[in-house]
Image: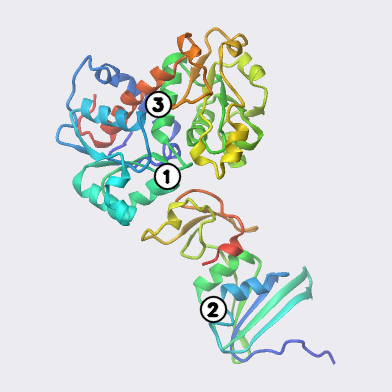
Amino acid sequence: MKKLKITPIKDGTVIDHITSGFAVKVLHILRIPESTSSVVSVAMNVKSKIGKKDIVKVENRELDTKEVDKIALIAPKATINIIRDYEVAEKHKVHLPAEIVGIVKCSNPTCISNAKEPVKSRFLLVSDDPPCIKCYYCERETEDIAERII
Amino acid sequence: MDFKNRDVISIKDFSKEEIIYVINYAKKMMPYAKGEKHIDILKGKILSTLFFEPSTRTRLSFESAMNRLGGRVIGFADPNATSQKKGESLADTIRMADSYSDVIVIRHPQEGAARLSTEFAESPVLNAGDGAGHHPTQCLLDLFTIVTEKKKIKGDKIVLLGDLKYGRTVHSLAYALSLLGAELSFVSPESLKMPKEIINECKEQGPEPSSTSNLEKAVKDADVLYVTRIQRERFPDAEEYNRVVGTYKVDINLLKYAKEDLIIMHPLPRVVEIDPEVDKTPHALYFKQAFNGVPVRMALLSLILGDRQL
């Protein structure tokens, strides 16, 4: 009998199909470990039908849409499974909205959105996969999105 | 075509038809811009000019345009004499200007400043340059100049020379010229090449631009040579600036290769890139181009603010 490396969770969120090597960045986006005291399991380089992938399981926490949007910026193929009482209650793919507000900092140091102005950063979606976003203010495409997550 | 109360942030805010409409309307403004005729269609209206960066032509021609239309102007040309010096945000400065005037013209060193200003102003905002971003009214006056001199833009061979990386005027201009069907050729030092995204935009709009480092060859069959200054203030370090400044120079020798009716344009100020001897030749059009800022800005202000049009 095969033994599971990561056991099923009772309640929480399973983020599956994360681009291999990006699990740590997903944890960073979710502010883990700072934001939770629950058990978090990470599996990296897991073999799957479409190649290697990473998986993150967060117990006792259901991700909200804003957090999911953030994940889509670095792992566009990820799927989110909300687990309630060991069953998959909801399953959906991450989806980048047409406009991304207050999540990413513009990579252009002279963009007005990086000055002390009373506005949130705002980006327009250029392409989903690979994720490409353009600052609404300075119109530059942002490089190293993962590093720019607020 | 409705321009009433519109913000003007980027040339991309205009369709091809709207650009042509503004150019034609600016032609009608010519006698008023020269002071040969008088008009007061903006009587009672106030323009705020907020210049957070130095300017000669843009600010003065906006002020001249507003005065020629019968309106009044308030504003500043030195941000150190404003509350920005005390740490006031741009948003708050805009709120104030908005309450004191009917239209705002802003120049700011940071990209996106004009776009941000629209969020805090009910009055229309006109971008007079935002860092390395956009300068749409310069673009319109450049197009106006070419149309006035060459009678058309479609099929014209236009060389853009100089700082094509940081130069905000050439980015807007390349896009608009492609939209209007010009054949573009880019000449620049290797480190100041036209950004890929601008070249891609040009391709999407019209003929594919060519790039070369050989100015003589590019000038040979050109109808328009558009020269830009290598901008010291946009360089991250002085060493890089010193390496490229003076790479190209437009002088009498270069003009031996040019067609008789080649026109030379420059958004000014120039430093070393055009020899003063060229000023005396019929090719030099840059001073006339600078004057054209008045009729074009009159046209825009009138279309955006005026209830009565010519």
Marks 2, 1: nearer the viewer: 1
In terms of secondary structure, where does tag 2 sit?
loop
Marks 1, 3: nearer the viewer: 1
Q: Residue at x 55, y 24 (%)?
A: B182
Q: Label 2 is placed on what type of residue? A: Leu
Instruction: Name the residue beneath numbered marker 1.
Output: B109
Q: Label 3 is placed on what type of residue? A: Leu
Instruction: Name the residue beneath numbered marker 3.
Output: B141
Q: Residue at x 45, y 60 (%)?
A: A121
- Can residue B193 be seen here? no
Q: Residue at x 61, y 32 (%)?
A: B244
Question: x%, y% of residue B243?
Answer: 63, 34
**Quarter in which the N terminus of chain A is drawn:** bottom right
Instruction: Name the residue beneath numbered marker 2.
Output: A63
Question: x%, y% of residue A5?
Answer: 77, 87
Which of the pair B13/B254 is nearer the observer? B254
